[in-house]
Image (cartoon, rainbow, N blue to C red):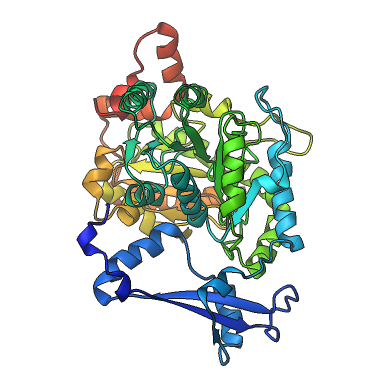
Amino acid sequence: MRQRENENPTSAEIVIYTLEINVTNTVTLLPEISTLRLYAVSFPETSLKQAMIFWRLTGLGISSRLAEDCLESLDGPRAVAVAEALALKEHNSSQAFTLIRTRIAKILNNSSRSQRVNRATADDDVYLYPSGMAAIYYLHQTLFSWRSTPSVVFGFPYELTLKMLDTYGSDCKFFAFATNKELGKLQAHLEAQSLGGRGVQAIWCECPSNPLLRTPDFDRLRQLADQYEVVLIVDETIGGFANVDLLDVADILVTSLTKSFSGYSNVMGGSVVLNPSSPLYPVLKPLFQSSYRNELYLADALQLERNSRDFLRRTAQVNMTTLALVNFFQNLVSDASSHVTAVYHPSTCWSIENYRNRMRPRTKDFEPGYGGVFTLEFSSVTAARIFFDASKLHKGPSLGANVTLLQPYVQTVFYKEKDWAARHGLKESIIRVSVGLEDQEALLNAFKEPMHVLEATLGKRASSAKLRNVDIMHSLPWIHRSKSDSGKEHAFEVIDGNL
């Protein structure tokens, strides 16, 4: 992943352009902004691959709304000096930004279940970014300026997170399965790094993970983070901070606001939240105060604020619909003749108790759930393809939209890395589902239709007792509890870890 030094162009070959554009008369009617400044970089064509990697992994660039506003006034751009450009006054004080920060902080402070949280999250602990990946990238860069030691990714993450850390960090150790056995390996790694004098900068994880929806033991991770003085970062985009409370364990939360917080797939955004109860808060807060710049465009903030007004209502509906769909497919998994061999969801995973330990308490206004994403595993790539092609639902790589989306995950995300994905627990025959706001009964029927086509095409699947046991082990939560109660090693660790 990391670029070789001889691939980099010389400083003389890179030119930075700064343009100032007067947008007073644009159609956006944003009185807070009269001038926009854009930055462009030219580089040799031989460096196009590195530039595209940067663009993809960092989430930086201009949004479509910003581009439209600039096009309205593109006839009179003015070149400005870099020093002048850096002195541009931020539009940080607009009410839209304040409302978004306040909304996030209010949800985070609502119905916390932990004794560890002794300070409420303030609005100025919430930092906004133009995309989820921009939030992740800038967070990493800020921490790297403080401590340039290696990172750890615990559990299978959003793939660009892992690639970004590997490309732009000093080193990144990856523990794909997030099992208790891997927690032991993580502790051994942290100990070795500490004895070697390097330490570890941060542990990155998700709640739950993408796309197999596993939840690590955050209490144990918190203990390790304290013991080895490591920053614990949790991306809770899929679970959603309405459903899960991570501030009792995380030093930093990172979220793609593009997903369920927005919910309408028409704007991008990201956030980083510093936990004021974290022992590292006195160190982290000054880092952000000195380096943070709000680059979320105001027109995007306005749209994001409007979209997120019904965030809790949408989350409650999606929670219930998703659970109904998961129950439907879970019944198919228990049928040995079904081509659906596993359903991955926090409610069906071996790590269900880890997720439940993070769920917010129920209130009169909101009942937390397991989120709106689940993944189906089919008996073969052929079966998955027939199901996918026969489905009339929307297809795409995002999640948290107002419409249900299907994605053949490995085929689209790891098309050129299928063997690597398989070694880390992802089969080619999985399809990730992000549940939208459609009527529950209508969605059930929409999923039944491609199942009928699949069965009519391939017929009933021949029963395999050995394979069925493995599939059920993946998807039935009570299996791991009975093993744990007996004191024996978790069977799922052997299966998931291919040990």
Q: Nearer the viewer, residue 34 or 348?
A: 34
Residue at point 62%, 41% (across, down): 241
Q: Nearer the viewer, residue 237 or 67?
A: 67
Is residue 31 positioned above or below 148 on the image? Answer: below
- x and y percentages locating residue 275 in the rendered image: 62, 37
Is residue 41 positioned above or below 278 on the image? Answer: below
Q: Nearer the viewer, residue 262 or 434?
A: 262
Residue at point 24%, 48% (across, down): 418
Residue at point 38%, 31% (across, down): 199
Q: Is residue 66 left or right of residue 47?
A: right
In this view, which residue lies farthest toward the front? 83
Q: Nearer the viewer, residue 384 or 131?
A: 131
In this view, which residue lies farthest toward the top? 486
Residue at point 35%, 50% (across, down): 163
- x and y percentages locating residue 352 in the rendered image: 50, 27
- x and y percentages locating residue 281 in the rendered image: 61, 36
Q: Quadrant of the C terminus?
A: top left
Q: Is residue 462 left or right of residue 249?
A: left
- x and y percentages locating residue 362 in the rendered image: 71, 31
In this view, which residue lies farthest toward the right? 364
Is residue 265 positioned above or below 231 on the image? Answer: below
Exactly how many numbered labels are in the figure? 0
Q: Is residue 371 visible?
A: no
Q: Is residue 2 left or right of residue 61?
A: left
Is residue 59 positioned above or below 435 on the image? Answer: below
Q: Is residue 232 left or right of residue 93?
A: left
